[in-house]
Image: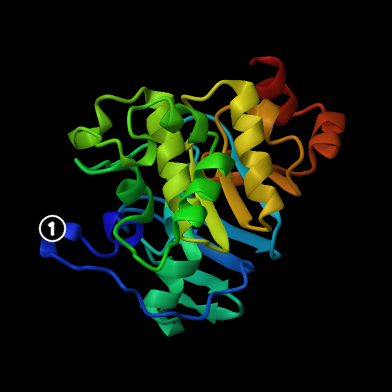
Amino acid sequence: EDVMKYPDDPVFGMDMETESYDKLTGSLSMKHVTFGYSKLAPPLIEDFSLELKRGQRVAFVGATGCGKSTLAKLISGLYRPWSGEILFDGKPISEIDRNIFTGSVAVVDQDIILFEDTIANNIRMWDNSIEDFEVILAARDARIHDDIMQREGGYNYRLTEGGRDLSGGQRQRMEIARVLAQDPTMIIMDEATSALDARTEFEVVDSICKRGISCVVIAHRLSTIRDCDEIIVMDKGKVVERGTHEELMAKNGLYMQLVTSE
C-alpha cells in the first residue's frame, strides 16, 4: 500500500521533477467480483458489482469484518479478485500504466507516515512540480492551513519524525492535504477522518466533492455520508442493502439500525 501512497521514497535521493502523465477520469466499474484471502475458506467478497461515474461518491457501511476494507484494497489494486473484473475507464489495472494509475487513484487511510522535514515538503512529497499555491490550496481544503500558520515558520516548520508534534486529527488532515496536492481523480478513504469532529469532517469531504474527485468511502460516521450517490450496506462480505440515504431509511432495515445506533 505504501508503494501506492508514496511511490518514490525520498530516502533514495530522488529529487522529483516528475513527468507529466495523463490521468484517469475517475470512473470505476466492478463486475461480479469474488475474492477471499484463502482458497481453503469461503470467499469474503462474493459476486460484487458497482458502477461509479466521475465525481460520484459511494460509501461502504457495515459492522467490523463485513468486507468494507477488503473492497477498498481490491479497488486500489492491492489484491486481484478470484473472478470478475475491476475496470478504470473501461480498462483493467494490468493494462494501465503504473504512473497513470498512482497519479490518478489515491488512498487515505489510518496508516499515516510523516517525515522529519518541513510541512510543505511533507505535503508535496518532494515533488517540485507542485507549486507553493497548490500546497496551500490543498491544506486549506483539508482544513489544516490555519493549524499550520499557528506554527513558527508556517509551512517551513519542521515536523518531528512521524509527526509526533501533531494531534491525531492534524495528522489525518496532513495526509488528506498530501493527497489533494497530487490532484487525483479518485480517492479511496478508509476510516480517513476518524479523528476529526463531525463539522470538520463534513467541510473536508465537501471540499473534495467540489474538486470533482470520485470518492470511495469506508464510513465510520454515518452522518457524513448521507449525501453519497450510493450507500452500500455490507454484511459478511455480501451486499444486503444499497441505495441513497433516503431510500435505505425507508426500507427500515440494517442501515436504519446502524444509523439509529450511533
How far from the left and from the top, in percent, is residue 16?
A: 28, 69
**At 19% across and 68% down in the image, what residue appears?**
14
> Do we see residue 233 in this rendering?
no
Would residue 167 be found to the left or right of residue 201 on screen?
left
Residue 243 in the image: state x and y as whole percent. 78, 45
Residue furthest out toward the bottom: 95
Tell me where residue 248 sits by quadrant: top right
For the point 62% across and 22% down, the residue is 198
Residue most toward the left?
Answer: 12
Q: Depth check: 144 or 201 in front?
A: 144
* Residue 179 in view: yes
Query: Where's the N terminus, which quadrant?
Result: bottom left
Task: Report the residue at 60% width, 37% height from top.
Answer: 204
In which quadrant will I find the C terminus? Answer: top right
**Colouring scheme applied when the structure was drawn:** rainbow
Which structural element holds mark 1?
helix
**Residue tagged 1:** 11
| Residue 136 spot, x, y in % from top left | 50, 47
The mark total stands at 1
Up the image or down, 133 lies above or below 20; here it is above
User: Extreme front residue here?
Assistant: 153
Q: Nearer the viewer, residue 63 or 111?
A: 111
Q: Quadrant of residue 48?
A: bottom right
Which amino acid, by three-letter code, is at mark 1? Val
Q: State whether residue 80 is above or below residue 136.
A: below
Figure check: 64 above or below 98? above
How would you rate the neighbour count of disc 1 (Cα within 10 Å): few for under 14, some for 14-19, many for 20 or more? few
The foreground one among 206 and 218 is 206
Say which quarter of the image contains residue 97. Answer: bottom left
Residue 260 image offset from top left, x and y in percent: 71, 16
Q: Is residue 50 above or below residue 107?
A: below
